[in-house]
Amino acid sequence: MIEFELWYLVLLPLLFAAGWWLRGVDASQRGGEGDGGPRAYFRGLNYLLNEQPDKAIDAFIGVVRLDPETIDLHFALGNLFRRRGEVDRAVRIHTHLLNRADLPARSRAEALAELAQDFLKGGLLDRAEESFTRLLDEPRHRVDAQRALLRIYQMEREWDKAIEAARRLEREAGESSHVQVAHFHCEAAEKALAAGDEERARSHLEQALKVNRKSVRAAILAGDLATRRADAEAAIGHWRSVGEANPEYLPLVAGRLADALDAAGRRAEALNFLRRSLLDHPSIDLLDVAQARVASWEGPAAAEALLRDELQRHPSLAGFERLLASRAVALGDAPLEQLHMLIQAQARKLARYRCSKCGFRAREFHWQCPGCSSWDSYPPRRLEELDAP
Protein backbone atom coordinates (compact mmCIF):
# COMPACT_ATOMS: atom_id res chain seq x y z
CA MET A 1 0.00 0.00 0.00
CA ILE A 2 2.79 2.42 0.91
CA GLU A 3 4.67 1.58 -2.30
CA PHE A 4 1.48 2.19 -4.31
CA GLU A 5 0.93 5.60 -2.71
CA LEU A 6 4.56 6.59 -3.36
CA TRP A 7 4.15 5.91 -7.08
CA TYR A 8 0.83 7.71 -7.01
CA LEU A 9 2.62 10.74 -5.56
CA VAL A 10 5.14 10.52 -8.39
CA LEU A 11 2.59 9.90 -11.13
CA LEU A 12 0.31 12.76 -10.17
CA PRO A 13 2.88 15.54 -10.72
CA LEU A 14 3.99 13.82 -13.94
CA LEU A 15 0.46 14.07 -15.29
CA PHE A 16 0.32 17.73 -14.41
CA ALA A 17 3.72 18.26 -16.05
CA ALA A 18 2.42 16.62 -19.21
CA GLY A 19 -0.63 18.81 -19.08
CA TRP A 20 1.64 21.82 -18.81
CA TRP A 21 2.97 21.19 -22.33
CA LEU A 22 -0.42 20.26 -23.77
CA ARG A 23 -2.22 23.39 -22.68
CA GLY A 24 -1.60 25.28 -25.91
CA VAL A 25 0.29 28.23 -24.48
CA ASP A 26 2.25 30.33 -26.96
CA ALA A 27 5.88 29.68 -27.78
CA SER A 28 7.19 32.68 -25.88
CA GLN A 29 5.68 31.37 -22.66
CA ARG A 30 7.21 27.95 -23.22
CA GLY A 31 10.56 29.47 -24.08
CA GLY A 32 10.67 32.05 -21.29
CA GLU A 33 8.96 32.08 -17.95
CA GLY A 34 7.28 28.76 -18.59
CA ASP A 35 10.58 26.89 -18.55
CA GLY A 36 10.73 27.21 -14.81
CA GLY A 37 7.51 25.25 -14.42
CA PRO A 38 8.59 21.90 -15.87
CA ARG A 39 12.02 22.22 -14.27
CA ALA A 40 10.38 22.74 -10.87
CA TYR A 41 8.12 19.78 -11.52
CA PHE A 42 11.01 17.49 -12.32
CA ARG A 43 13.01 18.73 -9.36
CA GLY A 44 10.02 17.87 -7.19
CA LEU A 45 9.75 14.43 -8.78
CA ASN A 46 13.44 13.83 -8.22
CA TYR A 47 13.08 14.71 -4.55
CA LEU A 48 10.09 12.38 -4.20
CA LEU A 49 12.00 9.51 -5.80
CA ASN A 50 14.89 10.15 -3.42
CA GLU A 51 12.49 10.21 -0.44
CA GLN A 52 12.97 13.90 0.26
CA PRO A 53 9.33 15.01 0.51
CA ASP A 54 10.04 18.34 2.23
CA LYS A 55 12.28 19.49 -0.64
CA ALA A 56 9.67 18.17 -3.08
CA ILE A 57 7.04 20.33 -1.39
CA ASP A 58 9.28 23.39 -1.78
CA ALA A 59 9.68 22.63 -5.48
CA PHE A 60 5.95 22.19 -6.07
CA ILE A 61 5.17 25.36 -4.12
CA GLY A 62 7.53 27.13 -6.50
CA VAL A 63 5.46 25.84 -9.39
CA VAL A 64 2.36 27.57 -8.00
CA ARG A 65 4.19 30.89 -8.05
CA LEU A 66 4.91 30.35 -11.76
CA ASP A 67 1.51 28.97 -12.69
CA PRO A 68 -1.52 29.56 -10.42
CA GLU A 69 -3.47 26.96 -12.41
CA THR A 70 -1.59 24.20 -10.59
CA ILE A 71 -3.55 24.77 -7.37
CA ASP A 72 -5.43 21.50 -7.89
CA LEU A 73 -2.12 19.65 -7.86
CA HIS A 74 -1.39 21.00 -4.41
CA PHE A 75 -4.80 20.03 -3.10
CA ALA A 76 -4.21 16.51 -4.43
CA LEU A 77 -0.73 16.28 -2.92
CA GLY A 78 -1.95 17.61 0.42
CA ASN A 79 -4.74 15.02 0.53
CA LEU A 80 -2.32 12.23 -0.28
CA PHE A 81 0.09 13.32 2.43
CA ARG A 82 -2.79 13.42 4.92
CA ARG A 83 -3.90 9.92 3.90
CA ARG A 84 -0.37 8.67 4.46
CA GLY A 85 -0.42 10.14 7.98
CA GLU A 86 2.12 12.86 7.10
CA VAL A 87 -0.11 15.57 8.54
CA ASP A 88 2.66 18.14 9.05
CA ARG A 89 3.43 18.11 5.32
CA ALA A 90 -0.26 18.36 4.40
CA VAL A 91 -0.56 21.33 6.78
CA ARG A 92 2.43 22.99 5.14
CA ILE A 93 0.96 22.70 1.64
CA HIS A 94 -2.51 23.90 2.59
CA THR A 95 -1.16 26.73 4.76
CA HIS A 96 0.91 28.00 1.84
CA LEU A 97 -2.17 28.05 -0.38
CA LEU A 98 -4.25 29.80 2.27
CA ASN A 99 -1.61 32.51 2.72
CA ARG A 100 -1.51 33.40 -0.96
CA ALA A 101 -2.88 36.91 -1.46
CA ASP A 102 -3.97 36.19 -5.05
CA LEU A 103 -5.91 33.01 -4.23
CA PRO A 104 -9.54 33.16 -5.45
CA ALA A 105 -12.18 33.20 -2.70
CA ARG A 106 -13.52 29.78 -3.69
CA SER A 107 -10.05 28.20 -3.57
CA ARG A 108 -9.29 29.96 -0.27
CA ALA A 109 -12.34 28.37 1.33
CA GLU A 110 -11.28 25.00 -0.10
CA ALA A 111 -7.78 25.42 1.34
CA LEU A 112 -9.21 26.29 4.75
CA ALA A 113 -11.45 23.19 4.62
CA GLU A 114 -8.48 20.98 3.76
CA LEU A 115 -6.36 22.58 6.51
CA ALA A 116 -9.16 21.95 9.02
CA GLN A 117 -9.19 18.28 8.01
CA ASP A 118 -5.41 18.16 8.45
CA PHE A 119 -5.71 19.49 12.00
CA LEU A 120 -8.50 17.04 12.78
CA LYS A 121 -6.50 14.09 11.42
CA GLY A 122 -3.50 15.21 13.49
CA GLY A 123 -5.52 15.46 16.70
CA LEU A 124 -5.09 19.25 16.92
CA LEU A 125 -8.68 19.71 17.99
CA ASP A 126 -8.48 23.36 19.07
CA ARG A 127 -7.04 24.44 15.72
CA ALA A 128 -9.49 22.20 13.85
CA GLU A 129 -12.40 23.70 15.77
CA GLU A 130 -11.21 27.23 14.97
CA SER A 131 -10.87 26.43 11.26
CA PHE A 132 -14.24 24.71 10.97
CA THR A 133 -15.89 27.58 12.86
CA ARG A 134 -14.53 30.01 10.23
CA LEU A 135 -16.03 27.79 7.53
CA LEU A 136 -19.53 28.30 8.95
CA ASP A 137 -19.57 31.56 6.98
CA GLU A 138 -18.96 29.69 3.71
CA PRO A 139 -22.26 28.38 2.26
CA ARG A 140 -20.55 25.56 0.30
CA HIS A 141 -18.78 24.24 3.40
CA ARG A 142 -21.22 25.16 6.16
CA VAL A 143 -22.98 21.79 6.58
CA ASP A 144 -19.76 19.75 6.43
CA ALA A 145 -18.19 22.13 8.92
CA GLN A 146 -21.13 21.66 11.28
CA ARG A 147 -20.77 17.89 11.05
CA ALA A 148 -17.05 18.16 11.79
CA LEU A 149 -17.69 20.48 14.74
CA LEU A 150 -20.26 18.04 16.11
CA ARG A 151 -17.63 15.30 15.95
CA ILE A 152 -15.04 17.51 17.65
CA TYR A 153 -17.39 18.50 20.47
CA GLN A 154 -18.05 14.83 21.17
CA MET A 155 -14.34 14.07 21.22
CA GLU A 156 -13.79 17.00 23.60
CA ARG A 157 -16.84 15.99 25.66
CA GLU A 158 -18.29 19.47 25.28
CA TRP A 159 -21.86 18.29 25.51
CA ASP A 160 -23.66 21.64 25.54
CA LYS A 161 -21.85 22.62 22.34
CA ALA A 162 -22.60 19.21 20.84
CA ILE A 163 -26.31 19.67 21.58
CA GLU A 164 -26.35 23.05 19.86
CA ALA A 165 -24.41 21.76 16.85
CA ALA A 166 -26.81 18.83 16.44
CA ARG A 167 -29.79 21.16 16.62
CA ARG A 168 -28.29 23.39 13.91
CA LEU A 169 -27.86 20.37 11.65
CA GLU A 170 -31.49 19.42 12.26
CA ARG A 171 -32.66 22.91 11.33
CA GLU A 172 -30.41 23.51 8.35
CA ALA A 173 -29.76 20.06 6.89
CA GLY A 174 -32.80 18.13 8.08
CA GLU A 175 -30.59 15.51 9.75
CA SER A 176 -32.49 13.75 12.54
CA SER A 177 -30.31 13.40 15.64
CA HIS A 178 -32.77 12.83 18.48
CA VAL A 179 -30.96 9.68 19.62
CA GLN A 180 -27.61 11.49 19.69
CA VAL A 181 -28.98 14.56 21.44
CA ALA A 182 -30.62 12.41 24.13
CA HIS A 183 -27.24 10.80 24.79
CA PHE A 184 -25.56 14.22 24.91
CA HIS A 185 -28.05 15.24 27.61
CA CYS A 186 -27.36 11.99 29.46
CA GLU A 187 -23.62 12.60 29.29
CA ALA A 188 -24.17 16.11 30.66
CA ALA A 189 -26.40 14.67 33.40
CA GLU A 190 -23.73 12.17 34.44
CA LYS A 191 -21.18 14.98 34.52
CA ALA A 192 -23.51 17.05 36.72
CA LEU A 193 -24.15 14.11 39.06
CA ALA A 194 -20.41 13.57 39.44
CA ALA A 195 -20.12 17.24 40.42
CA GLY A 196 -23.01 16.93 42.88
CA ASP A 197 -25.31 19.21 40.87
CA GLU A 198 -28.54 17.20 41.06
CA GLU A 199 -30.76 19.99 39.76
CA ARG A 200 -28.73 20.38 36.58
CA ALA A 201 -28.72 16.60 36.15
CA ARG A 202 -32.51 16.51 36.51
CA SER A 203 -32.89 19.25 33.89
CA HIS A 204 -30.73 17.39 31.38
CA LEU A 205 -32.59 14.11 31.96
CA GLU A 206 -35.92 15.83 31.39
CA GLN A 207 -34.57 17.22 28.13
CA ALA A 208 -33.25 13.79 27.11
CA LEU A 209 -36.67 12.20 27.60
CA LYS A 210 -38.33 15.12 25.82
CA VAL A 211 -36.05 14.64 22.80
CA ASN A 212 -36.29 10.84 22.87
CA ARG A 213 -39.01 9.47 25.11
CA LYS A 214 -37.72 5.94 24.45
CA SER A 215 -34.25 6.69 25.81
CA VAL A 216 -33.29 3.70 27.97
CA ARG A 217 -30.23 5.45 29.29
CA ALA A 218 -32.20 8.49 30.45
CA ALA A 219 -34.66 6.24 32.32
CA ILE A 220 -31.80 4.38 34.03
CA LEU A 221 -30.14 7.63 35.07
CA ALA A 222 -33.46 9.02 36.29
CA GLY A 223 -33.64 6.02 38.63
CA ASP A 224 -30.09 6.69 39.82
CA LEU A 225 -30.99 10.32 40.51
CA ALA A 226 -34.11 9.30 42.42
CA THR A 227 -31.99 6.97 44.55
CA ARG A 228 -29.64 9.83 45.41
CA ARG A 229 -32.66 11.82 46.50
CA ALA A 230 -33.83 8.92 48.70
CA ASP A 231 -36.95 8.44 46.55
CA ALA A 232 -36.89 4.64 46.34
CA GLU A 233 -40.34 4.28 44.81
CA ALA A 234 -39.53 6.67 41.98
CA ALA A 235 -36.28 4.79 41.30
CA ILE A 236 -38.09 1.45 41.26
CA GLY A 237 -40.67 2.91 38.87
CA HIS A 238 -38.03 4.15 36.42
CA TRP A 239 -36.16 0.84 36.39
CA ARG A 240 -39.35 -1.21 36.05
CA SER A 241 -40.29 0.90 33.02
CA VAL A 242 -37.00 -0.07 31.35
CA GLY A 243 -37.68 -3.78 31.85
CA GLU A 244 -41.24 -3.50 30.62
CA ALA A 245 -40.57 -1.34 27.54
CA ASN A 246 -37.11 -2.70 26.63
CA PRO A 247 -36.64 -6.14 28.22
CA GLU A 248 -33.36 -6.69 26.35
CA TYR A 249 -31.88 -4.03 28.66
CA LEU A 250 -33.01 -5.82 31.83
CA PRO A 251 -29.42 -6.89 32.68
CA LEU A 252 -28.50 -3.21 33.05
CA VAL A 253 -31.18 -2.49 35.64
CA ALA A 254 -31.91 -5.85 37.29
CA GLY A 255 -29.28 -5.45 40.01
CA ARG A 256 -30.36 -1.89 40.78
CA LEU A 257 -34.03 -2.85 40.92
CA ALA A 258 -33.48 -5.94 43.08
CA ASP A 259 -31.32 -4.00 45.55
CA ALA A 260 -33.88 -1.19 45.76
CA LEU A 261 -36.68 -3.67 46.47
CA ASP A 262 -34.54 -5.38 49.10
CA ALA A 263 -33.72 -2.04 50.77
CA ALA A 264 -37.45 -1.31 50.89
CA GLY A 265 -38.05 -4.57 52.80
CA ARG A 266 -39.36 -6.42 49.74
CA ARG A 267 -36.72 -9.14 49.34
CA ALA A 268 -39.22 -11.82 48.37
CA GLU A 269 -40.50 -9.57 45.59
CA ALA A 270 -36.90 -8.94 44.46
CA LEU A 271 -36.15 -12.68 44.28
CA ASN A 272 -39.37 -13.36 42.43
CA PHE A 273 -38.54 -10.56 39.96
CA LEU A 274 -35.08 -12.04 39.26
CA ARG A 275 -36.37 -15.58 38.75
CA ARG A 276 -39.26 -14.42 36.58
CA SER A 277 -36.93 -12.25 34.48
CA LEU A 278 -34.62 -15.22 33.88
CA LEU A 279 -37.54 -17.32 32.73
CA ASP A 280 -38.95 -14.68 30.40
CA HIS A 281 -35.75 -12.99 29.17
CA PRO A 282 -32.75 -15.25 29.78
CA SER A 283 -29.26 -13.78 29.43
CA ILE A 284 -25.77 -14.40 30.79
CA ASP A 285 -25.56 -11.02 32.52
CA LEU A 286 -28.99 -11.44 34.07
CA LEU A 287 -27.91 -14.87 35.34
CA ASP A 288 -24.86 -13.28 37.00
CA VAL A 289 -27.06 -10.69 38.72
CA ALA A 290 -29.54 -13.31 39.95
CA GLN A 291 -26.85 -15.74 41.12
CA ALA A 292 -25.07 -13.07 43.16
CA ARG A 293 -28.28 -11.95 44.93
CA VAL A 294 -29.51 -15.48 45.56
CA ALA A 295 -26.11 -16.49 46.97
CA SER A 296 -26.14 -13.48 49.28
CA TRP A 297 -29.77 -13.73 50.37
CA GLU A 298 -30.49 -17.50 50.30
CA GLY A 299 -27.04 -19.11 50.40
CA PRO A 300 -24.63 -20.94 48.04
CA ALA A 301 -26.83 -24.03 47.69
CA ALA A 302 -29.76 -21.99 46.37
CA ALA A 303 -27.46 -20.12 43.98
CA GLU A 304 -26.08 -23.41 42.65
CA ALA A 305 -29.59 -24.75 42.16
CA LEU A 306 -30.44 -21.61 40.21
CA LEU A 307 -27.39 -22.16 37.98
CA ARG A 308 -28.25 -25.81 37.33
CA ASP A 309 -31.84 -25.01 36.42
CA GLU A 310 -30.79 -22.22 34.07
CA LEU A 311 -28.16 -24.42 32.38
CA GLN A 312 -30.79 -27.06 31.69
CA ARG A 313 -32.99 -24.45 29.99
CA HIS A 314 -30.25 -22.41 28.31
CA PRO A 315 -26.82 -24.10 28.21
CA SER A 316 -23.89 -21.69 27.99
CA LEU A 317 -20.16 -21.83 28.53
CA ALA A 318 -20.37 -18.84 30.85
CA GLY A 319 -23.06 -20.50 32.99
CA PHE A 320 -21.11 -23.76 33.16
CA GLU A 321 -17.99 -21.84 34.22
CA ARG A 322 -19.96 -20.23 37.08
CA LEU A 323 -21.22 -23.67 38.18
CA LEU A 324 -17.72 -25.15 38.12
CA ALA A 325 -16.42 -22.23 40.17
CA SER A 326 -19.12 -22.83 42.78
CA ARG A 327 -18.41 -26.57 42.92
CA ALA A 328 -14.62 -26.13 43.08
CA VAL A 329 -14.93 -23.78 46.06
CA ALA A 330 -17.44 -25.99 47.87
CA LEU A 331 -15.49 -29.23 47.34
CA GLY A 332 -11.93 -27.93 47.51
CA ASP A 333 -11.14 -30.16 44.53
CA ALA A 334 -7.81 -29.16 42.89
CA PRO A 335 -8.39 -30.95 39.52
CA LEU A 336 -11.86 -29.43 39.36
CA GLU A 337 -10.35 -26.02 40.02
CA GLN A 338 -7.88 -26.55 37.17
CA LEU A 339 -10.74 -27.49 34.85
CA HIS A 340 -12.56 -24.38 35.96
CA MET A 341 -9.53 -22.22 35.13
CA LEU A 342 -9.30 -23.71 31.63
CA ILE A 343 -12.97 -23.12 30.90
CA GLN A 344 -12.82 -19.66 32.43
CA ALA A 345 -10.11 -18.65 29.95
CA GLN A 346 -12.35 -19.67 27.06
CA ALA A 347 -15.45 -18.11 28.57
CA ARG A 348 -13.69 -14.76 28.92
CA LYS A 349 -13.04 -14.65 25.19
CA LEU A 350 -16.78 -14.81 24.61
CA ALA A 351 -17.70 -12.51 27.48
CA ARG A 352 -17.50 -9.38 25.33
CA TYR A 353 -19.95 -6.99 23.76
CA ARG A 354 -19.75 -6.29 20.03
CA CYS A 355 -20.67 -3.16 18.14
CA SER A 356 -23.32 -3.86 15.51
CA LYS A 357 -21.87 -1.14 13.26
CA CYS A 358 -18.13 -1.80 13.17
CA GLY A 359 -17.68 -5.05 15.14
CA PHE A 360 -15.49 -3.47 17.85
CA ARG A 361 -15.40 -5.74 20.91
CA ALA A 362 -15.35 -4.52 24.49
CA ARG A 363 -15.39 -6.09 27.94
CA GLU A 364 -17.74 -3.41 29.24
CA PHE A 365 -21.06 -2.23 27.85
CA HIS A 366 -20.84 1.14 26.08
CA TRP A 367 -23.55 3.53 24.97
CA GLN A 368 -21.12 4.93 22.39
CA CYS A 369 -18.79 2.61 20.50
CA PRO A 370 -15.10 3.38 21.22
CA GLY A 371 -14.28 2.16 17.71
CA CYS A 372 -16.67 3.99 15.37
CA SER A 373 -18.35 6.46 17.81
CA SER A 374 -21.86 5.20 16.95
CA TRP A 375 -24.52 5.58 19.65
CA ASP A 376 -26.72 2.69 20.80
CA SER A 377 -24.77 0.24 18.63
CA TYR A 378 -23.99 -2.30 21.39
CA PRO A 379 -26.66 -4.93 22.01
CA PRO A 380 -26.67 -5.66 25.77
CA ARG A 381 -25.70 -9.28 25.15
CA ARG A 382 -22.38 -11.10 25.14
CA LEU A 383 -20.76 -12.67 22.09
CA GLU A 384 -21.71 -16.17 23.20
CA GLU A 385 -25.38 -15.23 23.04
CA LEU A 386 -25.13 -13.18 19.85
CA ASP A 387 -23.38 -16.00 17.97
CA ALA A 388 -25.47 -18.83 19.39
CA PRO A 389 -27.16 -20.94 16.67
Image (cartoon, grey):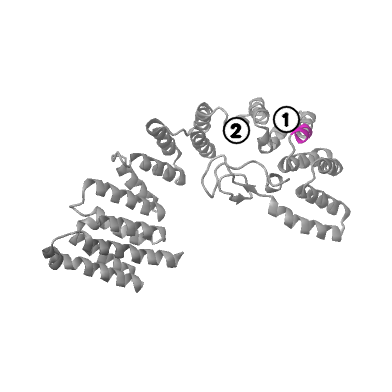
Task: Assign a secondary structure to mark 1.
Answer: helix
Magenta-drawn stretch contains 276: yes
Q: Examine the image and state in which quarter residue 235 appears.
A: top right
Report the Cα–Cα distance between label 1 and label 2: 20 Å
| Numbered badge on residue 128 | none
Q: Examine the image and state in which quarter residue 12 appears.
A: bottom left
Give the position of the C terminus as an image quadrant.
top right
Task: Assign a secondary structure to mark 2.
Answer: helix
Give the mark nearest the N terminus, 1 or 2. 2
Q: Which residue is drawn at the image coordinates 30% and 60% (left, top)?
A: 92
> In the image, 342: left or right of 141?
right
Q: Examine the image and state in which quarter residue 118 appears.
A: bottom left
Q: Nearer the viewer, mark 1 or mark 2?
A: 2
Magenta-drawn stretch contains 264: no
* Mark 1 surroundings: few (<14), some (14-19) or many (≥20) residues within 10 A: many
In the orientation shown, which residue stands out farthest toward the left?
28
- Give amino acid for label 1: Leu
- Give amino acid for label 2: Val
> In the image, 199: left or right of 122?
right
In the orientation shown, which residue stands out farthest toward the bottom?
50
Picture layout, residue 358 above or below residue 86: above
| Numbered badge on residue 216 | 2
Relative image position of residue 13 (x, y in whole percent): 30, 64
Relative image position of residue 22 (x, y in whole percent): 22, 61
Report the number of numbered marks: 2
| Numbered badge on residue 261 | 1
In magenta, the rendered stretch is: 275-280
Residue nearest the observer in this picture, 10 or 341: 10
